[in-house]
Each structure stands twice: as C-alpha cells, then as structure tokens.
Amino acid sequence: MSKYAPREWAPDEKPMLPGSPSTPAHPTRVRLAYFVVGILVSITGGLGNALVSVNLLHLQGVLGATQIEVAWLPAAYVMANASMNLLLVKFRQQFGLRLFTEFFLVLYALVTFAHLFVGGLGSAIAVRAAHGMLAAALSTLGLYYTLQAFSKPWRLKGLTIALGVAQLSLPLAYIFSNDLLQIAEWKGLYSCELGLALVSLGAVLLLKLPPGDRFQAFRPADFLTFSLFAPGIALLCAVLTFGRILWWHETPWIGVALAAAIVLLAAAICVEHNRANPLLNIRWLTTGKILHVALTLLLVRIVLSEQSVGAVGFLRAVGLDNDQMRVLFGCVLAATVAGIAVSALTLNIEHLTWPRVVALLCMALGAWLDAHASNQTRAEQMYLSQSLLAFGGTLFVGPSLVSLIFTVVGNPGALISFSVLFGLTQNLGGLLGSALVGTFQTWREKFHSSHIVEQLSSLDPLVAGRIQSGAAAAGRLLADPAAATRQSLQSLASTATREANILAYNDVFLVLAILAAASACWIFLHAVWLHYHPAPQPAPAAPPGTPPPPDPVTD
C-alpha cells in the first residue's frame, strides 16, 4: 500500500486538519502525560528567545557590541521564524509527524548546544536565526501534544490552553533569568535552554504522537513563493526593528529595505494568486471575516506592547533593573495563567464576541491606570495594571483563533494560510507594536523636553535656587566652584530629561488605552451589525441531474 494512501479512521479519531495527528481515545494517565509534554515543549520553544530579549543589555557587554548590533539578535530570530510555517505545514503533511517531531527537536537541541560555543556577534546572530526557524516547529508540536490530552468535546478548550501557554515565556524569563546569569553568566541562559531542549527531546521520544495521514504536498512552485516571501518578510522585520533605533528617515538602507520588501511580497502574492494550488490562499486571506480577525489580532499585539516595551521602558527609565521587576512579572505570570483558565472554561463557540470585548476592556483599563505614572511610580504601583493587560491578552487570543479554525476545517487548503496569518500577526504585530510605541514615545519625549527646557530660565528664582543648592551639594566633593555649578546644571538637565520621558510614557499608555477601548467598541458594533444583517448563506447545491432553472429573460 502506498505511504500516501489515506487510512480508515473512526469518526472520533480522524485528524481534524491535514498534517495533524489522529485523536484516539487515551487513558487518563496518558492524557495527563500528553498535557505535561505539550506544556514543556511550548515553553521550550518560546523561552529561549525571551531569555535573550530581556537580557540584551547584559549580552551587549558580553559580546562587546553596540546597542544597534545587539538588536540583531532578536531581529534575526523573528526574521527566520515568521515565514517558516510556509514550509513546515507541508513538511508534516508529506513526511509525517514522527519525522517532523524527531528531526526538528534534534536540530533544536543541536542549535541550542551551539549557543554555548558562540564567541562573537556574527555567530550569535546566525545561531539565533537557526533557533527562530526551529522554534516555529516547536510551537506547533506543543499545540499537538496539548490537544491529545483532551477529548473531542473539550478539544477547542485545549486549543485555548495551548495558545495561552505560549505567552508564559516572557514573564518566566524576567522571573529567573537573573539567577541563571549569576550561576554561569550568559552561558547560564543557554545551558537552561539546552536542558529544556534535551528534556523535551527525551519526552517526545518516549511519548510519540499518534499517526496522521500523509500525502504528496510539495510542488516546485512552492519554493519560488518561499524564495520571494521569506526575504520580503525578513527585510520588513529589519525595517520595523531598526527604524526607531536608527530613526526612520535618517538611515538610507531602511528605505531601500522597505522598498525591496514591498516588491518581493508583491511578487509572491502575484505568483500565488495565479496558481491552481496556491501555497498562500490569497482569496481566503482577503475575505472580510479573515481580515477582521487578523486586524484585531494585530491591534491586540500593538496594545500588548504596553507591557513589553512601555511598562518595562518606563521602569528602566526611573532606574529599575530586571531583578527589581521579578515580583511584578510574578503577578503577570499569575494573571496570564488566570486568563488561560478563564478563556478555556468560558469558551462557547456561539458567543465568541463577549470574551474579546471584555479582554480589550481589561487591557484598556490597565493602560489607563499606567497613564497616571509619576517619578514616584515603581513596580509595586503597576501590579494591578500589568495583571489586567496579561489577563486580557490571554483571554482574547483563544476565542479569536477558534473563530478562524472553523473556516479552515471547512477549507483545508487554507491551513497554510491560517498558520502563516497567525504567525505574522504575532511576530510582525509584536515588532510593529514595539516600533510604533518606541517611535511615539521618542517623539513625545522631544515635545515635552522642549517645553520643559523653555521654562528652565536662570532668571526664574526657583530654577536659580535649584542650581545653587545643587552646586552647594556638589561643592562638598569638588573644590572648583565652576565645576560644581556645571555638575548642578547637568543634574538639572538629567532631571528634565527624566520628567520628559515620564510624560511621554504617560502619553503612550493613554493612546494604547484609547486604542484598546476603540477596538472593543469596533468588535461589539461589528457583532451587532452581523446580528441584524447576517451574511447571506450560499444556496444549497442542486442534486445531480436536476435541470437548470428557467431564465426569466428568454423563457
């Protein structure tokens, strides 16, 4: 029998989608084992990049790199990760889940092992890019293992749990990365990542996924599309990463990269639009429902940048480091777990709008609370606001993805497009959020700084008194009065810059709160519109042999 021949499945065992495993009934202890392995693999796939992202300042010193050079580490990861689902879905479909599982986990362990021997920035960037490609496989693998733990009526709830677990990596990295650095400096981070990879490899070798159907999936034109799409996405990631660092209109290569990305992506879309069996289903991607869900996912990723870029940037601006944010991210971790639990327990396919509206309102409230920060605000004052953001983020993703799953089940050819769409909204959405938040914060800081400096006149008695008191304090350490005065002026300028940054972050938080609230209103009004103006259902197909209806013009 051909290896691509379809198998006979029981109704409850048939794979839900092409390339996914079958779903036989497992004993309770086996289901529990699948759940544990799924959580382990999901966290392994995301924790490595999170450990690097939250410790860039430390790695910058270790590698002897500038801020711009070290920014290539997370950028290389996202550039390689964002487009890999174009090939990974068909790899599973053609070569089977067992080869997919073992091949990519072994490669992941080898790449992680290579981290321990990285000696320079160039090799570190290459390793991060390889890690990004392989981590895309691990996220899907963790999803499949988690779904095996749930019976058919609970499988969609298992999907929300698997998606939420992927968001645990960032708070976990903030909580214990300092301990790893104290144990073995930067090698402590990579040793932890290698240990998780080896444990995951052993777990999936002991507990294998059930088999699924295989069929001939790859076509020669697929590689043409990938050769256009992947470098286009990589260039776009580079633009979003370095635009706010090097500034958008002051670095010529950013404009060239953006133009090249547009050309490459447009060429990939043209190739796919005219194919009989496209790798990317452009017509499905441009339907109203898909565009609606994709835009909401993108907006949520931008709002969640308030946590990873806004709140962390603010706390670092007032002098805190990662170790002083551990309790804060402990609260974020607890809120994320709570969001996963509530999302899974309340999931109802008939009512997917309300969880998303509530999630966005929680995020809007959290961002609004942060918009009242001052120079006295520390991590303790952000426990509630950041917990609301984390809770809302995990509560939102599950119902949004479930609404897309049903369109894929009815149209299996859109599976690759679905995988790519979700990956892009998460990867590019995160980069876009960071770029927009960082750019807006810089712009508002310059605005507030100019207003503050205008008011710092030496003719103002309050300003003059501040300079004199600062000079008197510095005079205890400096014998030269002129040097003491200069030190006082520098201290006053630093204070003005700090206050301008605080006001700018408040503006960022307020705008993100408005964006989240507006998104909630948009989703609610869209649901109301669909309730009173439902989309027309296609007419049922006529039975074979039925004559065509008469033409009212000719008959």
Image: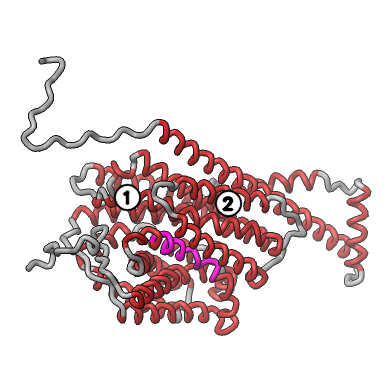
Q: CA distance from mark 2 to mark 1?
A: 27 Å
Vertical placement of residue 359 versus 143, above or below: above
In the displayed structure, does residue 307 sit left or right of residue 158?
A: right
The residue drawn where x is 32% and y is 50% is 406
Vertical placement of residue 356 versus 122, above or below: above
Circle 1 residues within 10 Å: few <14, some 14–19, many ≥20 = few
Which quadrant: the N terminus? bottom left
Residue 513 in the image: x percent, y percent? 61, 46
Residue 331 image label: none
Q: Which residues are magenta?
A: 159-172
**Residue 140 seen in this snapshot:** yes
Task: Tell me the amino acid under the disc marked 1.
Answer: Phe
Q: Earlier in the sequence, mark 2 or mark 1?
A: 2
Determine contact: label 2, label 1, CB under 8 Å: no
Residue 109 in the image: x percent, y percent? 37, 78
Which quadrant: the C terminus? top left
Magenta segment includes 171 = yes
Task: Tell me the amino acid under the disc marked 2.
Answer: Met
In the displayed structure, does residue 283 sit left or right of residue 545?
A: right
User: Would you identify the image quadrant in which residue 107 lies?
Assistant: bottom left
In the displayed structure, does residue 254 sit left or right of residue 467?
A: left
Magenta segment includes 536 = no
The residue drawn where x is 52% and y is 42% is 519
Judged from the image, the secondary structure of the residue bearing numbered disc 1 is helix
Residue 16 in the image: x percent, y percent? 26, 58
Residue 363 image label: 2
The residue drawn where x is 60% and y is 56% is 388
The residue drawn where x is 20% and y is 53% is 221
Residue 406 image label: 1
